[in-house]
Amino acid sequence: MRSMTIDHTLVGTGPTKVITVHGWFGGEDGWGLLPELIDTEAYTVAFFDLRGYGRRIDVEGDYTLDEVATDVFALADELGWKQFALIGHSMGGAMVLRTFSDDPERITAVVGISPVPASGVPLDPDSQALFDGAARDHGNRRAIIDLTTGNRQPASWLDAMVTYSAAHSRSEAVAGYLTSWTGADFVADLPGVHVPIRAIAGEHDPALGEATMRAHWMEQLAGCELTVVPNAGHYAMFEAPVSLTGAIDATLRGKD
């Protein structure tokens, strides 16, 4: 049996296979309580780091959406999964949509958590400067996490999130992926939706919240369902993990 070439962690042994794609300040082990709440008899979920992050921090890349999709399919092939569902957080939302677009027949469901749409996230000049600076300035990362969770969360949690992000990412990767997800533009490539698909937004997320989901994911993907998670901002896996897990479970089981 040949060894895996993409480091990953599997949670569960269930028949429904799932691959996750983390967000800009995330990583393989940066999903809050979600891994602990997975129904391990129903699902087998693969968590992995993008190039330039975590266990793959030294893996070189172009840091594009297409490259991520290629890695997702490579991981699925190594696992022997012909079909699988996708979960993407934040920029990972655009990445799972790119994956879905590249080979829709292999995908059984798509879940986006505070997800970037296929049309990207154009930034105004002030926001562009804030986000550009986050590649090297940890203060910018903290400000972004605070902003996108509604300026509601304790300083200790914000500091812990920044510490994790700084230790688990390379600045070149952070900068490269920023260009990829803000400038995403592949709406025309999205397939006709033939599988369960859901956007999950935190009620306190000012950037990728309910309004953005209604204007983009739900307009661009026919039949897309929307769940708004109370008492959460951009990081529902930390802020409201039980509610988030329920919405994911409903999607993967094909329930409304």
Image (cartoon, rainbow, N blue to C red):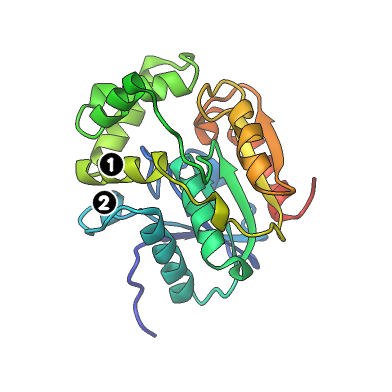
Q: Is residue 213 above or below residue 150?
A: below
Secondary structure of residue under mark 1: helix
Few, some or many residues within 10 Å of mark 2 (<14, 14–19, 20+): many
Closest to the observer: 171 or 246?
171
Q: Residue at x 67, y 40 (%)?
A: 218
Residue at 59% over, 30% down: 212
Report the mark closest to the observer, 2 or 1: 1
| Residue marked by disc 1 | 174
Residue under pointer 2: 52
Query: Does 161 appear above or below 193?
Result: above
Q: Name the quarter where the C terminus is drawn.
A: top right
Which residue is at 40% across, 59% downward?
66
Please name the amino acid that badge 1 sits on.
Val
Please count the marks in the image: 2
Q: State the image coordinates of residue 84 (x, y, percent, origin top left).
A: 59, 65
> Splitting the image into 4 quarters, where does residue 15 fall?
bottom right
- Percent across and percent down for residue 99 are 50, 60
Residue 10 seen anywhere in this rendered image of the structure: yes
Left or right of residue 140: residue 98: right
The quarter of the picture where the N terminus appears is bottom left
| Gap in angstroms between the C-alphas marked 2 and 1 | 8 Å
Task: Tell me whether circle 2 and circle 1 mark residues in contact (CB < 8 Å).
Answer: yes
Horizontal relation, residue 68 to residue 215: left or right: left
Residue furthest to the right = 256
Q: Amino acid at mark 2?
A: Gly
| Residue found at the far bottom of this picture | 1
**Which structural element holds mark 2?**
loop
Of residue 79 and residue 110, the one placed in the foreground of this image is 110
- Residue 60, image x, y percentages: 22, 58
Place of residue 18 in the rendered image (x, y in percent of width and height, measured from the top left): 57, 60
Q: Is residue 145 above or below residue 193?
A: above
- Tell me which residue sits at (24%, 52%) in the image: 57
